[in-house]
Amino acid sequence: EAGVAQSPRYKIIEKRQSVAFWCNPISGHATLYWYQQILGQGPKLLIQFQNNGVVDDSQLPKDRFSAERLKGVDSTLKIQPAKLEDSAVYLCASSLGGPYNEQFFGPGTRLTVL
Amino acid sequence: RKEVEQDPGPFNVPEGATVAFNCTYSNSASQSFFWYRQDCRKEPKLLMSVYSSGNEDGRFTAQLNRASQYISLLIRDSKLSDSATYLCVVRVGAGNNRKLIWGLGTSLAVNP
């Protein structure tokens, strides 16, 4: 079974530029998550989708971050404009649902903002 | 107080040692508990769920103490390959409002 796919794997940009990340979850997984993980810290949830609806985006900096999952499958996360403190690994995860729904993570996109 | 707190480590132990990690959570209504493992520069992967009665998987034992609001992970006979960061995860909420709260992780280095 194919896992969660993410691209690009690495991205280096200058501050104030824009960047977009793409995620393709495991087939059939209704729930999709975007996390930000700063070096030395645990993952921080940015946004959670249930199919194409947003369940939780309370920690998404909405002045610069946006995400969409238009057809309930693939998702994109955008940062515009980027700041130095956005340097992190952006992880996408998906899960089937249910009370003990294991999250499966993609390899992540490592973003460096110069 | 943070919602989920873990010993930051790092824990440096020799091969064969037994090591225990603790995690405390602040929300008494938390419903589900997990340990994830994250290798250096890799994504987190589920190690084990934590059940009320405690559960064991080979060398790994997870326990939950609801009264004291803490979870533990015990690794016996540690191997070099156990070197990783161990993340404590707690689920709160219900229905579509369920969300996972992640600890910062505890780093383990098993030395030869």
Image (cartoon, helix red, strand yellow):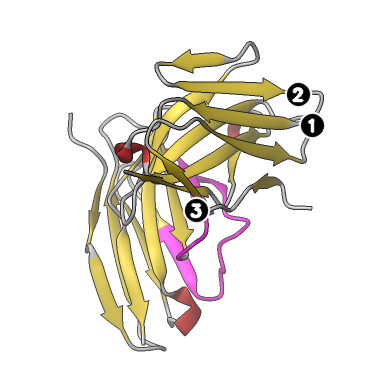
Which label number is shown at residue B28?
1
Q: As drawn, is B111 to the left or to the right of B102?
A: left
Give the residues in magenta.
Answer: A39-67
Residue at 67 percent of width and 47 percent of height: B5
For marks 2 and 1 on the same chain, the one whose residue lies earlier in the sequence: 1
| Residue picked out by circle 3 | A43
| Residue picked out by circle 2 | B66
Camera-nearest residue between A56 and B76: B76
Q: Are the two marked residues, 3 and 1, in contact with CB atoms closer than 8 angstroms?
A: no
- Quarter of the image where the C terminus of chain A is located: bottom left
Mark 1 crowd level (few <14, some 14–19, many ≥20, 10 Å Cα) = few
- Amino acid at circle 2: Arg
Q: Note whether B32 is above or below A91 in the view shown.
A: above
Q: Chain of mark 3?
A: A
Camera-nearest residue between B43 and B59: B59
| Total numbered circles | 3
The stretch drawn in magenta includes residue A63: yes
Is residue B54 shown to the viewer in this render?
A: yes
Give the quadrant of residue B64: top right
Q: Chain of mark 2?
A: B
Cα separation between marks 3 and 1: 22 Å
- Amino acid at circle 1: Ser
Q: Are the two marked residues, 2 and 1, in contact with CB atoms closer than 8 angstroms?
A: yes
- Residue A64, image x, y percentages: 50, 75
The stretch drawn in magenta includes residue B18: no
Residue at 49 percent of width and 53 percent of height: A43
